[in-house]
Image (cartoon, rainbow, N blue to C red):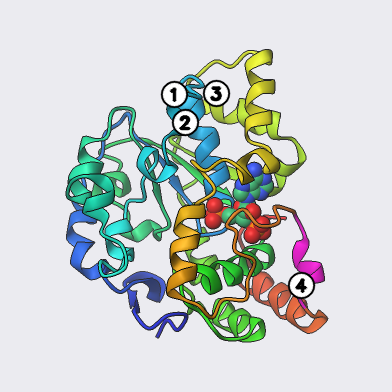
Amino acid sequence: KCEVRSGFVEVGEDNFCVPVYYEKFEKAINQFEVRDSDVYIVAHPKTGTTWAQEMIWLIVNNLDYEGAHEDILKRFPVLESAAHIDSEIVDLSQFYGCDYMTYLNNLPEPRCIKTHLHWSLLPEQIRTGSKKPKIISVLRSPEDTCVSFYHHCKLIEGYNGTFDQFCDLFLAGRSCYGPFWKSVLSVWKERHRSNILFIKYSDMKKDLSTVIKKVAKFLGREINDDALQGLVKHLSFESMKKNPAVNFQSVVDMFASVYHKTTAPNVFIRRGIVGGYKSDMTTDQIQKFKAWTKENLYGFDLDVE
Ligand code: A3P
């Protein structure tokens, strides 16, 4: 059983770990009416999803910085949010002004939608290819993802175990939206589809302009050099960290008050580097991760460093 918070359950292929309320919404998600004009981001939590979302939303919306003042949770909502949120802590209908699935259905086109789900749990129309929305998947090293997720879970999920215990849960596929590699590979196996693009957190760090151009081309948008410079600046770590539309500070503050025990720094946009795990993990933990990655990626042409 998934163990980070009582309330996660395993479903379907690969014993994928989903939030407890998922089963209530499983049918609605599976039958969700996809549009060819939709843009989806499919990624494991903490891989830089929010960073990529902000980039995608601005590219799709012709750099509408004014519109980008709205909370990213409203501009680029999460497909499975209703399954994730404890309605006693957060009333989604109040935040969205209507029933959540209705909100998703009524988003203005082109709709931007985020999901952490395994490929096998995505809406049927995506899996069968009867609808061909653009799908972008973000990859990040499992070590940095795990460190980031540990802080996230302390902050937002009420996790109160040690980091070492968290690493073991992550490796065992018992953290939410795990097992990590099985989920990443479930999308990677679909990479032959022309409507899927993979981007890497490490490439965004190394050369954000090139990733922006690649994503813009994939989305069929033009971006000139001046606009590109402006977008790079907007997407910088420092700028995103203080931007209330993307830094989730209100969510973090709310959960910090629910889970008083947190000792993690109270920020969502936390460190933002590649290889930070080298100072957070022991040699033993790093070796465990490397061996586990080697085993999981055997026969797959995939490198996320
Ligand atoms: P760290 O915890 O390692 O700092 P997600 O959005 O998928 O939850 O991912 C969150 C991670 O992306 C966090 O990683 C966060 O700091 C990082 N991140 C967010 N915005 C970023 C940016 N503009 N530049 C670099 N990293 C960013």
Distance, label 3 to label 4, CA atoms, is: 37 Å
Q: Dot 1 corresponds to which residue?
A: 61
Element at badge 1? Answer: loop
Question: Label for residue 217?
Answer: 3
Q: Which residues are magenta?
A: 274-281
Q: Residues within 10 Å of mark 4 (few under 14, many from 20)?
A: some
**Pointer 2 residue:** 68
Residue type marked 1: Asn
Label 1 CB sits under 8 Å from any ligand 1 atom = no
Q: Amino acid at mark 4?
A: Asp
Residue 149 showing in the rendered view: yes
Residue 223, position in %: x, y? 59, 16
Q: Nearer the viewer, mark 3 or mark 4?
A: 4
Marked residue nearer the N-terminal end (1 or 2): 1
Q: Which mark is residue 264?
A: none
Name the residue: 21% across, 44% down.
Answer: 97
Q: Position of residue 239 (x, y in %)?
A: 65, 38
Q: Earlier in the sequence, mark 3 or mark 1?
A: 1
Q: Residue at x 68, y 14 (%)?
A: 225
As rendered, which of 103 and 34 lies closer to the eye? 103
- Confirm or deny contact between disc 3 and disc 1 (CB under 8 A): no
Residue to which mark 4 is pinned: 280
